[in-house]
Image (tube, rainbow, N blue to C red):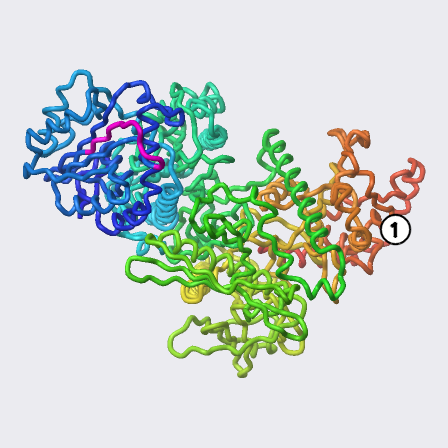
Amino acid sequence: PNQPTKPNQTKRFGLFGCSLCLSWRKTMGIGEVFLDRIERLRRAVWGGEEGGGEGSDLGVDAVVVCTGKIGDDGGMTYLKSYALFAWLFGEELQDSMLVIRRTEGAAVGAPAVDILIWVLDVSVKEALGKLAAPQGGSMKVELCKGGSAMTDEEMEGVVKQGSKWGLLLKEDDTVHAGEFFSHFWKRFGAMTDAANVADSLAAAMAVKDEIELGRVKKAATVTTAVFRNFAIPEIEDILDKEKSVSHQKLSDLIEEALLDPEAKAKLKGVRKQILDSCYPPIIQSGGKYDLKASAQSDTRNLTSGCVIISFGSRYGLYCSNATRTFLIDPSDAQKRNYEMLLEAFRQGLEAFVPGKPLNSVYASVSKRLGDSLRKHLSKNVGFLVGIEYREGAYVLNSKNPKLFEAGMTFNFGVGLSDLEDASNGKYALMVADTVAVTRSAPEVFTSNIRKEYSRIVYLINGDENELQDSVVVNAKSSKPPKASRDSSRPSLPADAEVNLANRPRRRREAVSNGPSAAVSVEEIEQRKKHQDELARKMREDGLARLRGSGHDNTDHVKDATGMNEYVAYRDSSAFPHSLRPRQLHVDMEAEALIVPINGIPVPFHISTIKNASKTEELSHTYLRINFNLPQAIGGSKLAVSKSVGDTLRFPDEDAHFVKELSFRAMNGGNLTEVLRKVKELRKRFLQREIAAAEAETLVEQAALELESGRRPTLADISMRPPLATGKYNTGTLEAHANGFRYRNVKGGYVDILYSNIKNQFFQEAKNETIVLIHFHLKNPIMIGKKATGDVQFYTEVMESAVKLSETRRNRHDQDELEEEQREREMRSRLNKMFLRFAREVEERHQLEFDAPYRQLGFHGAPYNSSVFLMPTVSCIVDLIDWPPFVLSLSEVEIAHFERVRFQLKNFDLVFVFKGFEREPRGKETQWTRISAIPMKEADSLKKYLDEQLIKYYEGTANLNWTNLLKTIRDDLEGFYEDGAWGFLELDDNKDDNGEVADEDDSLDEGDEAFEVSDEDLKDEDSESDDSDYSDEDDEVAGELSGDEFEGEAELDSDEEGKDWDELEEEAAKDDRRKGDFDDETKNEKKRVISGQKRSRGGR
C-alpha cells in the first residue's frame, strides 16, 4: 500500500493501509466522532461562530472535493483534499469525489447536511458503506459506472445538487493526475461563480479532538526519541571522528530511523505500519542556511561551526516537527545571540493562549529580540500542524488575526538568518517545537529535546590532557535533571560509547549554570512567584493532611485507614474536562477510574480496584474490572488483595460491595488505553502504600533466584562496606533474575534484591581514582554484623597514593609518557566495563541507573568534611567518600538557606524531610544540613531547587531544628493555620545595603501568630548533642576549603556589640597566643593541611 508523500519528496507509497483504516472505522462505527466532525465542517462553511472561517460568508449551498490518482513517480504533496478525506474517513482516498450539501429540517442528532461520495474502487465503496449505515441515510456512497471516470450523466447529476459551489480552486488538473479528476475539473473548473472553501475546511480541521491530539503527541514522541537516541549521537560521532558524511546521506539515515524507531532509536510501543517522516530531514552546515519549511539537504559534507537539524515524524497521518541548532566552538557573540533567541522563544510561547490572535506570538518574539536581531527574524515563527504539515491559513506571522483555540497544534519555531560572526563567519540559528494550545499553559510535545545553551555547545579546542582522560557518554545519560520530580528517570543509552582515541576530541561543553552568569530581574521575579505558589500549595496540602487524619494517633483510626480515607472527588464539579459521555476515563491526577452507569459517570478510586483484564471476542472487546472485597481477619475486614496487605481496611463491615464490572465496545482502542492506565495507576498506588507499610517494620528479604548461563557480570571489584579485609575484599558482582549477588574470593556473598533498591547510580572515573556502581536501599541489609542502607561496588583506576620522592617528572622521559598512556587506557577500559554492565542490567531487568551531573556540582560538608556534591535526576549525592551522602529530593518538604550574609563566604543549607509531623522513630532523622557551601553557589542552588519543585527559605542564622520541629509538632494545627513555614521568611528582611528593614512591612497577615523562641534561633555550635555542626567542624571545613586565614569566622550575638577597645584587646591576646607557636609546630600544621588538600585534589 502507498502512503501520501511529503513536500519535495519523490519516493512515496499511495493509499493508506488497512490497519489504521480498520481502527478508524471502528471508532467511527459508533458515529459520535464522525458526526462531530461533520457538524464542525458544517459550522465552518455555513455560519457557526465557532467555525470562525471566511467560508461562513461565501454563500455556497454545496461543497465538492475531488482527488486524483498518484502519478507513476509516486510524488504527491500535502493537499487539503486528501487531508479532508483522511480527517473524515481515516484514509487519503484516491480517485474519489465528496459532495456535501446543506439541508433543512434534519432529524435531531443528525448533521444538517447530505453527503454523497463517488468512488472507483469497489472495496472502498464497501468499506465506506459500513460507515454510512449508522448515519440514518445522511451519507450515500456511489460506485462510478464509467470505469476510469464518471459518466456525463453521473457528472450532471452531481452538478444539479447545488446552484453555487464551494471548491478547492488551487487544486486544479496540474496538481491532481488521472482521468477521474480531469473529467471532474473539466466540468467544475469552468464555473466562474465558484467560491474557494480552503480556509473554511482549514478552520474545521484546526481544533484537534482527543484522538487527534493523541496521534500528534505520539508523532512528537517518535521525533524526540530519534533526535535524542539517533540523530544527536550520529552527529557527535561524525564530528568526533571527523568522518566525511554528506548532508543528504545523514538525512537518509535519520529518515530510516524515523521509519523504524524501535531498531534505530530504542523506542518501543509504536506501530511501524502507520509511521512516516513528514518530509526528508533537513541538515545544514558550512555557512549556507535556508530556514524555510521547503529547504532541502544538499550533497555537501557536514562540517563544524553551526549545524541546524530539522525533521518530524508522521504517526497515523498526523505530523510533528522539531528543529535544533548545534554550535561548535562558538564565540561570545554567538552565545549571546542564541540565549537571546531562547528568551524570545519562551516569550512567544506565553502568547499561546485561547482567545489571543495568532499575530501576538510574532509580536512577542520580535519585541524580545530587540532592534539588533529583529531584522534577522524570519517572516513567520510557525504554522498550524496536523494532517497537513503546514496549514497556510494559520501561519504565525505579524498579520494573521485568527484566534487561538484550545486543541490547536502548531510548529512553533524562531529562526535568525544571515548572521555573521567575526571568528566563525556566516551562520544561522533556529529552534522549533511542536506545541499544543490548552486551556491553561501551552504543552510542548517535544520539550525533551533539550535546547539550553549548555546542551547544544561542543568544544574542539579544549585542554588536551583533560579531554584524553575524559569518558564521553552520549546525550541521554549526560543531560541535566528534568525540571520536575516525577518517577521516570533517564537510563544509560544503549549506544553510549567510551572514546578510546588517544587524541583531543570534541565533547559537550560543561557550561556552568551557576551565579557567574548574571541572573535577570525577570528570572528572579518569576522564581519568586513560583516559590509563593509552592508555599501556598504546601500549606493547603498540610492542612488537608492534618484534617484528614484528625491528628489522632489512636489505634482505632490507624485500623480504619483505607477505604474511608481515599476520596477521588468531593463533588462532580471536580470531574476532568476531557471526560466524554458513555466512555470510560482514567484520571491519573485524582487516581480514579470513571465508568458510565446508566449514562451517569461514576468514579471509583484506584484503591478499590483489585485488577482488570481485557478479552476480545469476534468484533467486540470486553474489559472486566474486579474490586477489592472484605475478608474478616482478626476481627476487622481487610482487602482480599495480597499485594495491598492490611493497608486497606473496610470500616463498615455490614455494607454491600461491588464485586466486578464488565464493559463491551466495538472499538477496543479506548478500553486498551483504560486498561494500561489502570495498571500503571494501580502500580503507583501499591508501590506508595506498600512502601509506607514497609517503613514501619523491617522487611525480611526474599530468596535470590539464581540464573544459569550468561548474565551481566563485573569481575575483580571491591565492595563498601567491606565483606572482608584487605585482598579478600575482591570479588565478582552478578545480576540474576530478581537481584544481585556479590561473591568474594573467600566464598562469602551478599544478595541485593531489585525490589529493595531505592536508587542506583553509575559514576565514571573522571577526576576521581575509582569508578563505581552504588545502590541506595529501601531497607537496610546486614553485612557482617552491621546493618547498612548503602552498598557500593568499585575498582581503582590508578594508584590513590604515590611516594613524594618520586613526584619529579621529566616531560621528555619516554617511560613517564608510557606510564601516563597506560593509566589513560586503564581508566577508559574500566569505565567502559562498568558502563557495559549497567547497560546490560537496564536492558534485561528494567533498572535505570542515574548518573551524577558534574556541571551542576558544588562543594559542601554534609558530615565533618567538605566534599564535592553532585545532583542526579532525583538526588544530591557524594559517592566517593565513605560513608556516602544520598539525599532523595522526593523526600524533602522544604529547604532553608542559613547564614546568608553578604560579608560571609560560605552558607549552610538545611533540608527538612516529609513526615516531620510525627515523632521520629528510633534513629530516624527528620532533617539534614549541608555546611560550608561557597556563597557563589547560592543562586544556582536556588534555581535548581525551584526547578525540582522544592520550596526554599533564607535566613541569617542557624536554627536548632530538633527543638524547632518539636515545637511545631506540639501545635500542628496552629502551625499550618498561621502560615506554616512562613515564619522562616521573617529573617529575610534586609535591603541591599544590609540594613534591617521594617518588620511590619515584610509580614503578611497572621505571620506573627507563630513565633520562634530564642532557643530555636540559637547557633547549632552550642547544641553538640543535637547536631553534627560545631566550631571544630567549621575550622576543619575552612582548612579544607583553603580559607583558614580569610577572616571567615562568624560573630555571635555577644560579639556583635563589643566596642573598639574590647576588640583591640582581644586582637592583642590573639597575637600573643599565635606567637607561642614555634616554627616546628607551624611547619607540621602546614604539612597536615597540604596532605589533606592533596588527598582530595582529584575532585
Report if residue 301 is visible in the image: no
As rendered, which of 156 and 552 lies closer to the eye?
Answer: 156
Q: How packed is label 1: few (under 14 Cα within 10 Å), some, or many (20 or more)?
A: few
Which SS class for mark 1? helix
Q: Is residue 328 left or right of residue 652?
A: left
Q: Position of residue 859 (x, y in %)?
A: 64, 50
Numbered label tally: 1
Q: Quadrant of residue 886?
A: bottom right
Report if residue 477 is visible in the image: yes
Residue at left offset 32%, top offset 36%: 110
Q: Is residue 222 left or right of residue 331?
A: left
**Residue farthest top in this picture:** 192
Q: Is residue 640 left or right of residue 1038?
A: left
Residue at left offset 71%, top offset 50%: 910
Residue at left offset 41%, top offset 65%: 840
Quadrant, the C terminus: bottom right
- The residue that mark 1 highlights is 1073
Q: Position of residue 92 (x, y in %)?
A: 22, 40
Vertical relation: 118 (above or below) 1082:
above
Q: Position of residue 1031 (x, y in %)?
A: 80, 53
Residue at left offset 63%, top offset 69%: 637
Vertical relation: 374 (above or below) 516:
above
As rendered, which of 53 and 1064 lies closer to the eye?
Answer: 53
- Taking the magenta stretch, the answer to whether it contains residue 778 is no
**Residue farthest bottom in this picture:** 747
The range drawn in magenta is 98-109
Q: Amino acid at mark 1?
A: Arg
Q: Position of residue 333 (x, y in %)?
A: 46, 29
Q: Quadrant of residue 619?
A: bottom left
As rendered, which of 41 and 484 lies closer to the eye?
Answer: 41
